Image (cartoon, coloured by chain):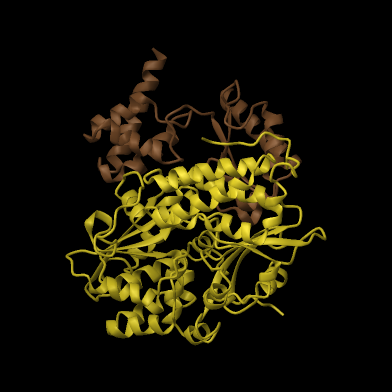
Chain colours: A brown, B yellow
């Protein structure tokens, strides 16, 4: 039963996001970004995509055109925290590969994978404008820069603690 | 001596950039109040005399753009602030939105008044969520204070502005792709004509300007206008916000007068190269900008001098790389970016970029042959002449300029004489 209530909650929240945008098709990108933000695994599940399509009265293919076009949207579940390492030019000359190595070792996954406990997803991303503090990565809205081995370890440690607190 | 200046950024040391009161106390919105009393011709004259060019990268004369937008006849017109700063190693728009949200807004309102726009959109990349919120707050405060909304400053001029988030797509910086994205669609460029200035967002005449361009406009109508106009050179008047990054001691955003040499910018402003390393190359204007060697260090940073030397200002990014960087690997990083960001609509850009990446990978593995040079030239030529939008047309420039300036390093990767650059497995996306 618990699961059904949770699902109902989710649909109510999805509906209120659409209502906030006056159910306007023109705000589809904004609506999908907000929906994704409230889903723990940071993606748009098929059922939710179908629900949005019916509610807004637009074709499902139109929803998937937007989801698959924009990097910020995903149709596949990701970890609770998505670590995006910048692999563009400024971070290249500041050796982002070092960050990648530390993260892969700390999380015991390769870039593109999610940890077994579903907490972290590690991925590359194009430049997000933190070149003044390069090498950098972002986790959701937070940007971490001027990174070295110790800082990366501390950040991961803090996220793990935060996650534990949430569970308990 | 300090070589960076503070003209447009004169009052940018706000305690709280989100405070409208503080902005007004530092002289904010005086320019708007002045502009709404001026005849339109005079507004365009001031912008034209400043020789201000679009600071997003295309360098189209702003005065001309505004005049053309004003000439369009329509019930409703749209002004867009392009804050989709996606060009790698560019972060000056981020800094401007952080430091002076109201100045960007004032520039936008002035431009809207000049062209007769009643709808505005600030399109901010998804990567800057905090700045989206900052601009929403700024819009709310400005509306309450009567600088936005109905009958602005009692001049019968109406303007509503909305913040729209991008979704992480570089191509959305292109005008028509940006318009598609504002309409809630996937951001693929449109066929032209009609041009955006005729039929843009929701089919309305649309005038798109970069954040920096808009933030300069209030200065042109303030008491600092003379300081601005007398900076720089005859052809490149005024100042530019540059983003310095890479292997430099003081990366950051600086306002500089046009006319400094690249050497002054990198060594005096950027603090030079750390760890006693030597300069190797720089890339100007973002990922689609050319690669230059140390031979270009004494070129002056102006539109005209850079053009004469096959370079360009682009977005104002200056990325510096020291001697530890391998040029072929760097170009592969650039190429990876374009493979990721090509929208896939046209074949030359979609396929060309992928094949260039495969070829670069052969160089890195020491498996390239002389034939690969021919392929590079054939593919890049096809992309330049037949790509649908600016992305595919310009993204071959780094590779071509790197081949020209660092040919030897590529030659060393040609089979028979080569040791693979790295034993690590390279990542190829096909």
The image quarter containing residue A36 is top left
What percent of the width, then of the height, locates residue A56?
A: 24, 35
Residue lying furthest right: B276
Residue shown at 57% from the left, 61% from the top: B290
User: Residue B413 appears at what percent x and percent y?
Assistant: 70, 46
**Total marks drawn?**
0
Question: In the rendered image, is residue A162 in sight?
Answer: yes
* Residue at horizontal 37 percent and vertical 46 percent from the top: B346
The N terminus of chain B - image quarter = bottom right
Tell me residue B288's x, y (percent).
52, 57
Instruction: Tell me if residue B387 comes above or below residue B229 in the rendering.
Output: above
Q: Which residue is farthest left?
A: B75
- Residue B80 at x, y = what percent? 35, 61
Which residue occupies the foreground of this view, B351 or B118? B351
Q: Is residue B114 left or right of residue A142?
A: left
Q: Is residue B332 left or right of residue A71?
A: right
Residue drawn at x 36%, y 25% as measured from the top left: A46
Q: Nearer the viewer, residue B154 or B381?
A: B381
Q: Which residue occupies the foreground of this view, B364 or A157?
A: B364
Residue B38 appears in the figure: no
Left or right position of B415 against B6: right
A18 up-or-down from B49: above or below: above
């Amino acid at each position: 039963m618990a699961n059904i209530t949770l699902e109902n909650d989710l649909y109510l929240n999805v509906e209120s996001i659409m209502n906030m945008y006056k159910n306007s098709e023109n705000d589809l990108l904004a609506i999908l970004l907000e929906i994704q933000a409230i889903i723990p695994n940071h993606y748009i599940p098929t059922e939710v995509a179908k629900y949005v399509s019916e509610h807004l009265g637009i074709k499902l293919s139109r929803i998937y055109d937007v989801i698959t076009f924009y990097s910020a949207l995903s149709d596949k579940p990701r970890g609770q925290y998505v670590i995006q390492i910048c692999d563009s030019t400024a971070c290249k000359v500041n050796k982002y590969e070092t960050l990648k190595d530390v993260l892969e070792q700390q999380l015991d996954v390769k870039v593109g994978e999610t940890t077994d406990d579903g907490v972290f997803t590690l991925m590359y991303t194009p430049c997000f404008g933190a070149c003044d503090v390069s090498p950098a990565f972002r986790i959701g809205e937070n940007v971490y820069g001027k990174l070295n081995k110790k800082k990366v370890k501390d950040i991961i440690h803090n996220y793990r603690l935060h996650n534990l607190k949430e569970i308990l | 001596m300090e070589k960076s200046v503070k003209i447009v950024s004169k009052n940018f040391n706000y305690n709280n950039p989100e405070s409208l009161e503080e902005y007004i106390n530092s002289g904010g919105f005086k320019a708007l109040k002045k502009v709404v009393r001026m005849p339109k011709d005079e507004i365009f004259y001031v912008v034209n005399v400043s020789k201000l060019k679009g600071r997003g990268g295309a360098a189209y004369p702003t005065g001309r753009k505004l005049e053309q937008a004003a000439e369009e006849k329509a019930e409703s017109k749209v002004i867009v602030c392009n804050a989709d700063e996606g060009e790698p190693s560019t972060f000056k728009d981020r800094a401007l939105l952080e430091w002076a949200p109201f100045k960007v807004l004032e520039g936008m309102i002035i431009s809207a008044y000049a062209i007769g726009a009643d709808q505005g959109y600030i399109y901010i990349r998804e990567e800057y969520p905090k700045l989206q919120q900052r601009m929403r707050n700024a819009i709310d405060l400005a509306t309450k204070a009567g600088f936005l909304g109905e009958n602005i400053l009692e001049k019968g001029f109406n303007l509503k502005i909305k913040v729209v988030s991008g979704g992480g797509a570089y191509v959305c910086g292109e005008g028509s792709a940006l318009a598609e994205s504002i309409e809630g669609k996937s951001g693929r460029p449109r066929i032209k004509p009609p041009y955006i200035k005729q039929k843009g967002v929701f089919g309305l005449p649309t005038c798109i300007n970069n954040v920096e361009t808009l933030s300069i406009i209030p200065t042109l109508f303030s008491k600092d206008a003379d300081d601005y106009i007398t900076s720089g050179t005859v052809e490149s008047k005024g100042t530019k916000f540059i983003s310095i990054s890479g292997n430099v001691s003081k990366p950051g955003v600086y306002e500089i007068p046009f006319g400094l040499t690249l050497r002054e910018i990198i060594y005096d402003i950027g603090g030079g190269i750390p760890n006693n390393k030597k300069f190797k190359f720089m890339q100007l204007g973002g990922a689609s900008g050319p690669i230059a060697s140390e031979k270009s260090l004494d070129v002056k940073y102006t539109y005209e001098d850079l053009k004469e030397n096959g370079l360009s200002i682009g977005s104002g990014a200056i990325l510096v790389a020291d001697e530890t960087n391998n040029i072929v690997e760097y170009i592969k990083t650039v190429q990876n970016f374009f493979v990721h960001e090509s929208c896939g609509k046209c074949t030359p850009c979609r396929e060309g970029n992928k094949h260039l990446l495969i070829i670069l990978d052969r160089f890195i593995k020491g498996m390239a042959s002389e034939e690969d040079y021919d392929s590079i030239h054939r593919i890049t030529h096809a992309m330049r002449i037949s790509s649908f939008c600016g992305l595919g047309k310009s993204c071959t420039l780094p590779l071509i300029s790197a081949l020209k300036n660092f040919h030897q390093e590529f030659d060393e990767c040609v089979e028979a004489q080569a040791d693979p650059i790295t034993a690590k497995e390279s990542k190829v996306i096909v």
